[in-house]
Amino acid sequence: MSDEGTEAKENKEPKEPRWVERVAPKNVDWSSLAVIPFLAVFSALVVGAVFIIFTEGLGSVLPAYGALLRGAFGGWNSISETLLVATPLIFAGLAVALGFQAGLFNIGAEGQMTIGGLTAVIVGISFEGLPAVIHLPLALAAGFVGGALWGFIPGVLRAKTGAHEVITTIMLNFIAFRILDYILKQPFTQAEGRFDPISKDVLESARLPRILTWLPVEGVEMLRLNLGFILALAVAWIVYWILFKSTIGFEFRAVGANPDAAKYGGMAVTSAIILVMVLAGGLAGLGGSNETLGVLGRAFPGFTAQIGFDAIALALLGRSHPGGVVLSAILFGALRVGGRAMQVETDVGIDLIIIIQALIIVFVAAPELVRAIYRIKGGEEARQLTRGWST
Amino acid sequence: MKRNARYLALLGVLVLVIAACGDGADDGTTTTAEAEGTTTTAEAEAEETATTAEAEATTTTEAPPSVEAITACQVTDTGGIDDKSFNQTAWKGVTDAIDAGLATADSDFLESQSATDYQPNIQAFLDKGCDLIITVGFLLGADTETMANANPDQHFQIIDFAYEPGVADSVQGAVFGTTDAAFLAGYLAAGVTETGIVATYGGIQIPCAVTCFMDGFVYGVRYYNEVNGTDVQTLGWNPEDETGVFTGDFEDLAKGRAVTQSFVDEGADVILPVAGPVGEGSAALALELGDVWVIGVDADWFETLPQYEAQILSSVLKGLDVAVFTAIREVAEGTFEGGTRLYAIAEDGVGLGAINDDVPQPLQDEVAALLESLKEGSIVPGDQALS
Amino acid sequence: MRNVTKRFPGVVANDSVDLTIESGEILGLLGENGAGKTTLMNILYGLYSADEGEILVDGAVTKFDDPGDAIAAGIGMVHQHFMLVPVFDVTENVVLGVEPTVGPVGTIDMTEARREVQEISTQYRLEIDPSATVEDLPVGIQQRIEIIKVLFRDAEIIVFDEPTAVLTPQEVEDFFGIINGLKESGKGIIFITHKLGEILEIADRIAVLRRGKVVGEVVPAEATEEQLAEMMVGRPVDLVVEKEDADPGEVVLSVTDLLVRDDRQHTAVDRVSFEVRSGEIVGVAGVQGNGQTELVEALTGLTVPLSGMIHLGGENVTLVSPRFMHRNSVAHVPEDRQRSGLILDFDVAENLVLNSYYDEPYSHGIRMDWDYAHQHADQLIDQYDIRTPSSTVKVSSLSGGNQQKLIVAREFSRDTKLIIASQPTRGIDVGSIEYVHARIVAERDAGAAVLIVSSELDEILALSDRILVMYRGRIVAEVTGGEATATELGLYMAGLST
């Protein structure tokens, strides 16, 4: 109000630049943002250790978790595999997280991946002779568009008729699987000499190139990490920018947090819902393309391997934040790849990993439980990620 | 969705394991294997019904005690180790070998969650230093080829896959004469049907690994018609134009149930599901309906799925365990060779399992006689007239 | 309650509060929002536990771990927001949770329940039909159901949290009759409010809370509204809105035959016509639910009217979007700030650009300029005296008064041709009310046309130059500001006079 007041404020500025406040705001509820997920992972590992103690004895805990860590990060091959598994999880996790931010529960990432992966393959097996610089982006774009279409349908149904996206996306998953079966049995796509639904191999010019082959280490030809990972990181950054730095993202988040206020603020709620679902579908479609154009090189039934469902857990763990999604995806990838080494090197089965993942989700979904265990005070009540069924 | 259910199931299994291990019953295999009670029961009974190949194997091991046990490692397809058929039967071959002293307790398996896991799972076993890596199933063909060519000194066995010569010569591809075995099942089915309609369906249309069962079944029915002047119809597969009914995967039991229901609606009363664990959906429905027979595949369902025994007609045995056991023995003895290996009916590599006691003895005798004719080669499936 | 202290992180919500309530007494509990009234009552009702101090019932120290304990000790609470199941009937709502049962399997004995409800209703002259469905009943009657619920559970001390906020003046009179009846039958009543007139009328004793402390206890006969207000706020408060006579200019808003249907396709606004001129404040009085909400939604572009015309400065704006209205200098203070005026999860700066983010200088193309938005927020925080640690604080942590100031800052800091303010001071403290009222008058004096919609008659009377009364979707009366009385308007609002 007064000039002195303004000056006093400005004097404080240099001590704490605004970007510090933006990046790490003082008022943010860190316990729910970062501490809870961290403690959830920690708690899940502790409970996992109890399982190990009961099944294999106390002495097996350290070797098992040691093998887990080494298997996930101990060596180029491990790192390559961990990030390789994380890549589609990042894409699909972003697809679900974007929906959460806008108050939509996108259970359809699996179906969107399926369609996106399929459309990418169709482009990837066509256009022989096209240079990779054109063919690969074209195939990826096709994957994005395919997934986006599969997100557009529930988006429109939700925005225009109120049909709940939980129902429609689940149903569209099944439709996507059957479409995949059908298309893959057509002569144009089906691999020659095969009678089961499996596509031809994607042409080399549309394959995601491996990115670690320049490393001066032995067995470099086994490092399967491909360009998809870089792409995933870039896309995560773009999603972050859209959500938090653009007017569109402001609308998405406003629609998610309070649709009435969004409408009051002059936002077009229905088109925001459709756009969110289109983008989410496109992201999942990229995830599917990442599989078919990358590590698999072809499409076949079930190539999505439940990644679209794991993505829901992952988005929850990552608190629907693109950065959180990337970290969670790498964690899941590490658990999966490390779990393999754990089973091979010790007597602890890889099923433990599934238990640990499930426990992480239980702890993340019940933040009060974690707060109670570790006696963390305060914290706002659990943030509502989606609106209820009635709205 | 399915994954979520699976988390719960696995938690349950682990709780059981805790209980089981309370009394120190630790024989060195992995936790999951222990949790599968069926593995051990199947093992015990396998001793009694040992095929000639196995008997032969056992005698060989006993003769030269100098043979050193090897580490055998199995990579499953996405069906999992406890699929009640394919992967489980192959794993039985490993556990049989452990019992016979041919394989070490360090032998292990890795379940593939998705197709992207095949290659790293094989790699994990290469790193572990396994003497023999067994990849189970047609779906692992490409990845096994890649890894075998990158590691030419490693012993590989792949089930249900035959490479063209020169593609992956170090790999032993085990294939099975399932057409012959299913021929017997078709004959038996045609003999017991009351509606005059029998049916078969597959999981995924994989040439021979799945469709040979279906071919043989249809041929068997035709042979029965030829001999007895009947007109039993087969639904679900046409060997001539290679079209038929497939559920699309080897995982979803509900689809097996649904397909079976539609066959029953069309009048079929004997069903042969060639779809791994999916077939259990058929067995469950048959048990509920009461007047429908199911025929098991891969393993003897009287042993692996005894809860359905009232409706199990018989099982088409595919000697996956025999093939795996044999390969382990050969590696241990140093006689292992790459190339395609056929496990035929003549050496009991395939066959028909126990037949339900309700089947009239004369028909059982006819089937037994037919088995001998097939072994001699006096009857060849596929030569029968279309009916 | 003796020496009760409750701390929340950073705040002492209740600081050594001593409070007694005797049977047959009405204790008025007065305090601004955030003074600690609600916290104190939640401790009494077992929802929170006190950090220090104790609660004594009939002289015995009692510990309440949950509301069940409090109910068992004879403490009942009538919340501001009713806790009723709309589709159940009166008796079902009353017995919910404590159903009388018969037989071995515990069948609910509805006959007995109905009889008891009838008995309570007769005893306290509540005049309730035990079989009526709740959703069909007016708000005043629903409140009585809440009272029966409490009595059914044998409460001796009954806490009323802002009970008159939802009632018409006539209903308030009836309500006072009821609680006097309760008092006579020996119940102890705690009456929480921020309305000074009411508390002076009904209470036997008044305790004033400020910043968690009891700053005084007075007897109504010895107190005036001004004194109470000063005790609440801690400084002298101007209760009368100082304003000059209006000097209306040209017509800014013109509404002709407006017909609006609500979500359920019932006619909510029934062919309404009126004008608002620049430099005047027009008040719309009426009991809530008589079409005011839909009227405002139609005027601001949030709903599409079925027929009729809306003109803004001569331009037809009947079918335009909220964004268009906003860009054309229409300020809108929405009725329910938490439901539609703010995004509680967002920070102060984000809320301050909620309806201008799409224009320069807050964004360039699709890129938000958060640096600018925060500078802008800091300015408004100073200018409008919004009490917040910084512009990056979530608005959910602000008090109601400061949330409302934020909205006022957002809406009034721009060019304003027309201000549409719905319940502009609902649920905020005296100090903030004073502030908001002064701002509205200042905007009028600067030449804005102002439309105030409020169910608080005092507010309408204090601010308006002209008053329209809405009843069942129609404007049933138009009165000049200075000449109206509360009684007259009350009759119009109840549909008893046309």
Image: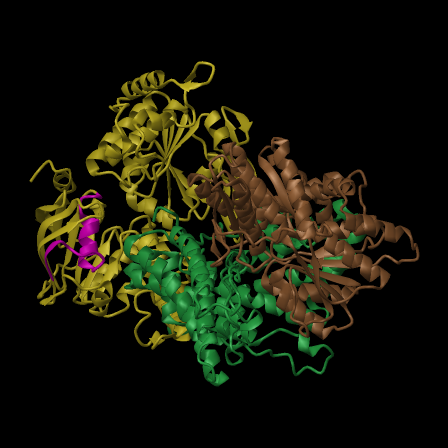
Q: Please state the horizontal and vertical placement of residue C440, each as a whole percent of the image.
A: 23, 60
| Residue C238 visible within the image | yes
**Which range of residues does the magenta coloring cover?**
C288-310
> Taking A81 as reference, is A209 above or below it?
below
Q: Is residue B309 left or right of residue C387?
A: right
Q: Camera-side residue: C331 or A30? A: A30
Q: Camera-side residue: C82 or C20? A: C82
Q: Which chain is yellow?
A: C
- Residue sitting at x 78%, y 42%: B47
Query: In the image as oriented, which residue stretches furthest toward the top?
Result: C103
Q: Please state the horizontal and vertical placement of residue C390, each as a whole percent of the image.
A: 45, 65
> Taking C400 as reference, is A180 above or below it?
below
- Residue sitting at x 51%, y 62%: A195
Q: Is residue C318 left or right of residue C334?
A: left
- Residue sitting at x 81%, y 41%: B24
Total marks shown come to 0
| Residue B300 visible within the image | no
Q: Please state the horizontal and vertical placement of residue A198, each as a whole percent of the image.
A: 51, 65
Q: Please state the horizontal and vertical placement of residue C234, each as a whole percent of the image.
A: 39, 51
Q: Is residue C450 left or right of residue C435?
A: left
- Residue sitting at x 42%, y 47%: C35
Q: Camera-side residue: C496 or A366? A: A366
Q: Which chain is brown?
A: B
Q: Is residue A290 left or right of residue C156?
A: right
Q: Is residue C428 magenta?
A: no
Q: Quadrant of residue B361?
A: top right
> Taking C182 as reference, is B300 above or below it?
below
Q: Is residue C299 magenta?
A: yes
Q: Which chain is green?
A: A
